[in-house]
Amino acid sequence: MARNQEKAMSMLSRWYTYQKELHNPSAPDKRPYLATECHSLQEAEKWRHQIIKEVARKVSQIQNAGLGEFRIRDLNDEINKLLREKGHWQDRIVELGGPNYHKVGPKMLDHEGKELPGNRGYKYFGAAKDLPGVRQLFDEEPPKPPRKNRGDLMKDIDAYYYGYLDDEDGILIKLEVEAEKKARKFAIEEWKLRKETGELDKELEEEERLEREEEEKKRRERKKAEEESAEGVTIEDLTPVEGLEVPSQKVMELELLRKKKMELLLKYASEDLQKSSENAKTLMGRELNLASLSLENREDMIE
């Protein structure tokens, strides 16, 4: 009987609290379920501070190892859920034009938690680090990344790696055009400045003078060579070479004719024909030698 009365009083108390919050405008508002439903920067800042207070309170509670395993796990889950919600509110504050707390905000509560190796995002706070099965995971060394072999490394090497397609994106061409415009503008301004000061005219006169000197030097060398060739060399200046026979015109014509015949033979005759002609020449040479020997013998006998 007493238990039923306690339940009724509990239900009545919750209903009374709900009606009081509903009809009392000064009662604190309930935090929106989604951060995108808030359109005021001040409201977003208020809800962020409220979440931070709740996280701080729960972190202090989870330090008590006597709460029991199930309560500690529930508190740890609630803390991680509030941290994720805090991140959503910080993103909403940035969207509404507020400061970026991801970069400038304090992270003391985040640093108190510890992540498992290879399990990013979920953290363990306080006594949750000593729960059964969790401490062993923290003591284990993280798995080493697999070692890549040469084939895996070569998969990422393509034309972009060697820089063959640097001009395809158009960025380099734009930079080159801008640099060319600047260089051309600078050259024109420098040319105008040198022309106004008269330095350009002096350089042109110096170049013309050097060109005239070079032409005069070449003309003198050419004239000297012509004079030397006009003097010529007399026959008396030539020293005869001992043992040198000068061929006659007929011998030169026969030699040229022989060379032309050999060229035509090498160009149009086959290898067999060339061999047969060589054999014929050798045979003819032997017959001529025999004929000359026989004539010499006959002459000796007649004498």
Image (cartoon, rainbow, N blue to C red):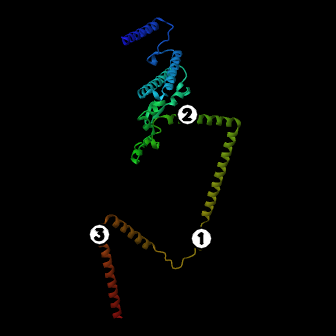
Disc assigned to residue 273:
3
Question: Which numbered mark, 2 or 3, is in the foreground of this view?
Answer: 2
- Which is more foreground, mark 3 or mark 1? 3
Question: Which badge, 3 or 1, is on the more N-terminal residue?
Answer: 1
Q: Decide: marks 2, 3 in contact (CB < 8 A)?
A: no
According to the picture, the residue beneath numbered tag 2 turns out to be 178
Dot 1 corresponds to which residue? 234
- The reply to whether residue 107 is visible in this rendering is no
Question: In the image shown, does 102 or 56 lie closer to the viewer?
Answer: 56
Tally the numbered discs: 3
Q: Amino acid at mark 2?
A: Glu
Quarter holding the N terminus?
top left
Q: Could you say which is closer to the camera, residue 87 or residue 198? A: 87
The foreground one among 95 and 141 is 141
Question: How packed is label 3: few (under 14 Cα within 10 Å), some, or many (20 or more)?
Answer: few
Q: Position of residue 46 (x, y in %)?
A: 53, 17
Sequence-first disc among 2 and 1: 2
- Secondary structure at badge 2 equals helix
Among the 4 quarters of the image, the one containing residue 140:
top left
